[in-house]
Amino acid sequence: MTPEAQKTGRQAVEDAVRRGSRRVLSRGLVTVVVATGLLFAVSVMFAASSVSRGTLLTMLPFASALAIAALGQTLVVMQGGIDLSVAGGLSLYVVIVTKYPAGDNSRLLAAIGIAFLAAVGAGLLNGVLIGRMRLNPIVATLGTNALLFGAVLWYTAGIPTTTTARLARVGGGLWLGIPAPVYFAVAATAVVTAVVKLTVTGRRFEGVGANGTSALTAGIRVTRHRAGAYVWAQVLYCLAAVLHAGIVNQPTAYEGNNYLLPTVAAVVLGGTSLLGGRGNLVATAVAALFLSQLDQFVLALGVTYATRQLVQAAALAVGVALYTIDWGGLARRLFGRRRASLAPT
């Protein structure tokens, strides 16, 4: 590769991620923060029980676990992919940290270590299938998801296990009046955001997602960055699973199913480009809070579970439409045609 070509490729990568790559305040963040504020205001007016102290203390731990899992999904989407193995992965990690200790606090750390090793293995499998073998991310992660659920059923036989007392104290404890999982979510968001936005590796990571061809021309190891996204995603899913296992006293073998659609919805509502490249991880975490409060609001209204699922799907559709449709151009075309039809002949 000639120095001129390498320089041109590197410049293309820098141009691809320059717009909004280092900004903390992005359109997606401002939008989701305003939407979350409005949602809480509406909740106070029409469903006050959804914002009571008891309800918030119950909702925030689940929102924290969702935020951490959604961070992992964001990393994958920033590479132009999608990870549908979040359900199977999270379910497996939950059963590992509950079934392996079997109520013995002394075995909890070993169980967490095994869960993280399993997460790295699942991430490497996705990375090889997608990065090396160039399989479609949907097909590859669906296959991995089925494999992970098979491991769950083999290990548990579908029988739930009670979590350990030590993990329950972490998942259900209060630190300075705030649920402990909130601190883990804030710390994870800060660390992942700092790595992606402020380090050379993070800039290259965004560059690979924005323009893989130019990144390859610049000498960046594209396959390694794309595969790494799936590995780190599974690690974050594992952290979310550990917190979830502490929040739920007796988790089932299918706890991860509750995270598949919400993680994707949080990424979209946070304004991360579905084409890869730029993304705002803080906005993703706020979107997780929005979705959790939306679920509490709808639940307080007394609707059915099916309706709650439809509301989540509608939120995902709104997020896609909000960031992918050129509303200004659409308005100009519509009103331009109307003026033209009303003009005198």
Image (cartoon, helix red, strand yellow):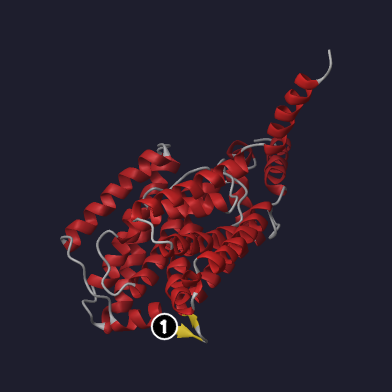
Up/down of 61 relative to 344, above or below: below
Residue at x-position 30% and y-position 75% = 110
In the displayed image of the protein, which residue is found farthest to the left? 157
Give 142 or 212, whichever is nearer the viewer: 142
Residue at x-position 36% and y-position 57% = 258
Residue 121 in sight in this render: no
Give 208 or 155, whichever is nearer the viewer: 155
Please indicate whether residue 304 sits to the left or right of residue 102 in the image: right
- Find numbered disc 1 in the image and state the secondary structure of the residue it sits on: loop
Q: Position of residue 303 (x, y in %)?
A: 38, 57
Q: Position of residue 119 (x, y in %)?
A: 36, 60
In the displayed image of the protein, which residue is found farthest to the bottom? 176
Amino acid type, residue under disc 1 in the picture:
Gly
Classify mark 1: residues with Cα within 10 Å, few (<14), some (14-19) or many (20+): some
Quarter of the rendering occupied by the C terminus: top right
Question: Quadrant of residue 344 in the image?
Answer: top right
Give 260 or 102, whichever is nearer the viewer: 260
Question: Quadrant of residue 160 in the image?
Answer: bottom left
Please indicate whether residue 330 sits to the left or right of residue 84 in the image: right
Quarter of the rendering occupied by the N terminus: top right
In the displayed image of the protein, which residue is found farthest to the top? 345
Q: Position of residue 145 (x, y in %)?
A: 32, 49
Please indicate whether residue 345 sits to the left or right of residue 175 in the image: right
Residue 60 in sight in this render: yes
> For mark 1, what is the residue?
173
Give 265 or 203, whichever is nearer the viewer: 265
Q: Position of residue 338 (x, y in %)?
A: 74, 25
Count of numbered marks: 1
Up/down of 124 relative to 247, above or below: above
Residue at x-position 49% and y-position 76% = 52
